[in-house]
Image (cartoon, rainbow, N blue to C red):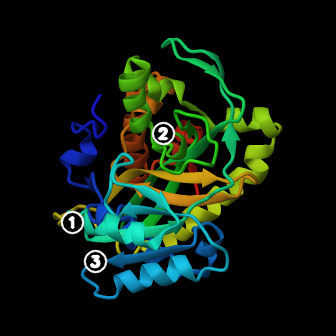
Amino acid sequence: MEKDSIRIDDPVFKKWILIAKINTLQNYLGNKKVMYDILSNDARSFDFLPLTATFNVIDPNFRELINYAMKYSKNKKTWILKPALGLQGQDIIISSDPVEVIKYIDSHIQYTDWVLSEYISNPFLLKINGRSSSGAVFNDTIGRKTHIRIYCLITKIDNNFNIYLYKDNLIFCAVKEYTGDNVTDKFSNLTNLHLGSMYYDNVLKLDGTQAYKDLSFPLKKTINKIFGENFYSDVVFPQIKTMLLVILQNSVNYLKCKKMNKGTRGCFQYIAIDIMPDVDFHLHLLEINSSPGLNAPFYHWRNLDKYAESILSRTSDLINGNKSTKNKFGKGFILIK
């Protein structure tokens, strides 16, 4: 199933009540630089945004900004540099040397916007042990870096915005264990599952698609097993809720539907948000994916088509004022705001 598949025969679309996409979301929340610039205006974001500098190479002073950020921070820090519109873990470096960072930017002229963030050097590590169905053998002694991926639905109906959290979310792992002493090893430092699939294909000589299954786990079940049955509800969910509220409240002025036809009342989009937990399970926002792939969820939610359909059905019911929505979809989405 394609990631954007929806039931276009739904009466909502025939009547032009709903347009499927918030077409400006990619330009704002989907752009790492713009996202950080928007959210950093809200003091609440400093609780979950890593220390970050954003810049455009057109600015003649961007080199001075990098030097200042990296040389004059309180402690000598390691930083991670990402292109604002980079995908699948590509063109990322980790460094504590501003000269190296500047040279890297100068050699990647295809990008103009960049994000330089403090590298989270004390990440939560997850140990995997046993043999998977793919044939991969895990015998972790240190553990792997992780990031949490949450799936959300944003709706704009009659100029009212809401954000919903999907109940089933995941935790992704790096394909190699984390040692912390080799920042050039992207397979242990980056948790992108596309990189994991490449490692499966090229190093382990296994089916790369199986990495999406082997290296992803149900979030709530996994962390509750490690920390206790109420850990997700007591520690993780409150942080996610605050993060989503700050994201929505600071982006409503930038999120717009496509050109509205007569009778159209709103639009929606599902997004995926990547969040890194540190060793104390304090959450740090990494990025927002405006058109996320669903390779990993496919293995966990066998009837994945129902996920996409439930987004449409949920939105349709909201538009049409269906009061039975809570009972029908209450277990699928959690209203945040």
Upstream in sequence: badge 3 or badge 1: 3
User: Mark 2: which secondary structure?
Assistant: helix
User: Mark 3: which secondary structure?
Assistant: loop
Residue 57 - label: 3
For residue 164, side relative to residue 100 (left or right): right
Asked if 76 appears above or below 177 in the picture, the reply is: below
Q: Amino acid at mark 1?
A: Ile
Upstream in sequence: badge 1 or badge 2: 1
C-alpha distance separating marks 1 and 2:
25 Å
Q: Where residue 260 appears, x then y in whole percent?
A: 19, 66
Q: Quick one: 30 or 135, which is closer to the camera? A: 135
**Numbered disc total:** 3
Residue beneath the point at 49% across and 62% down: 95
Occupied quadrant, residue 168: top right
Q: Where residue 258 appears, x then y in whole percent?
A: 21, 63
User: Mark 1: which secondary structure?
Assistant: loop
For residue 243, side relative to residue 194 (left or right): right
Residue beneath the point at 40% across and 67% down: 101
Q: Quick one: 305 or 326, which is closer to the camera? A: 305
Residue beneath the point at 66% across and 70% down: 47
Asked if 138 appears above or below 224 in the picture, the reply is: above
Q: Amino acid at mark 3?
A: Val
Residue 109 - label: 1
Residue 187 - label: 2
